[in-house]
Image: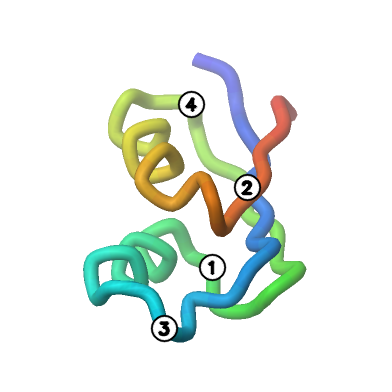
Amino acid sequence: MGKIKVKQVKSGIKRTLRQKRTLEALGLHRIGQVVEHESTPNILGMVNKVKHLVSTEEA
């Protein structure tokens, strides 16, 4: 499995509780923060749910 870098580019304020918790589960707490995860189906599914708040790139 490869790795992906996930960067938060928009705020979680005024988002649904599910989206806020998904950002937390990904380890994102503030705009501009970058985290690296394994490219598993679980992580890719979470990124897909908040794709309008984050940007991704392969690491």
Q: Residue at x 39, y 70 (%)?
A: 24
Local crowd at mark 2 within 10 Å, few (<14), some, or many (≥20)?
many
Kindly identify which residue carries mark 4: 39
N-term mark: 1 or 2:
2
User: Quarter of the image holding residue 16?
Assistant: bottom left
N-term mark: 2 or 3:
2
The C terminus - image quarter:
top right
Local crowd at mark 1 within 10 Å, few (<14), some, or many (≥20)?
many
N-term mark: 4 or 3:
3
Colour theme: rainbow
At label 4, the amino acid type is Ser
Q: Residue at x 70, y 58 (%)?
A: 34
SS under mark 2: strand
At label 3, the amino acid type is Lys
User: Relative to 2, is 13 above or below?
Assistant: below
Point out residue 40 in the picture as x, y percentages from the top left corner.
38, 26
Point out residue 53 in the picture as x, y percentages from the top left corner.
56, 58
Do residues under tags 1 and 2 come within 8 Å of each other at their CB atoms? yes
Q: CA distance from mark 4 to mark 3?
A: 28 Å
